[in-house]
Image (cartoon, rainbow, N blue to C red):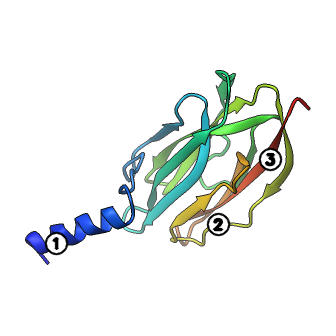
Amino acid sequence: MNGPNFYILLLAGVLVNGQGVRWENQLDQPLHFNCPSRQSISYINSQHNNAYEDRVWGFECKDTFVYEPNCHWSPYVNDFDQEFTFECPKNYVLTGMNSYHSNPHEDRRWKFYCCQANSYCNLKCLWTPYVNNFDEDISWHVPSLNYLVGAGSYHSHPHEDRRWRYQYCTQKAYC
């Protein structure tokens, strides 16, 4: 389908779904994402491409911090093809993700940006089950009134993809 009808359908799809998906990386390219100041990750979206054996990633953020938080990057939490479980330090929330892709391994190494929730402590932390199967899209919202604090993943050679799970917590002021 070419011509004006295609563009009308494309525009209609964008209008129905709100804004179009904004991918933060290109296939086989590095990912470097940080929420705007005083925000944390509230939504994770990803699509796998079998031709590239890689994923594109998109995120949304929500207001989280009253004051400018104290933040830091983790070191890389995995080597290629390795499983990992990462948790921000106690009373920190996850506000950014960074990775780079290796074509020989068809995998990514990951590190995470964590920010301290001033005057708040994390409570009632839970892990999700895996939110995707291999080669499937990811569309996961942090439950309302909760904050993302961790991520876990393992890699499959036959699929050259990862399954993902996430840890989230509620917060209480002045614990």
Other residues around mark 3 within 10 Å, as few (<14) / some (14–19) / many (≥20): some
Give the labeled residue for mark 1: 6
Give the labeled residue for mark 2: 131
**Is 57 situated left or right of 168 in this image?**
left
Amino acid type at image mark 2: Val
Between disc 3 and disc 1, whose residue precedes? 1
Label 1 SS: helix
Amino acid type at image mark 1: Phe
Measure how far apart labels 3 and 2 are at the Cα level. 20 Å
Amino acid type at image mark 3: Thr
Horizontal and vertical percent for residue 163? 63, 64
Label 2 SS: loop
Give the labeled residue for mark 3: 170
Q: Quadrant of residue 119?
A: top right
Horizontal and vertical percent for residue 105? 51, 55
Between disc 1 and disc 2, whose residue precedes? 1
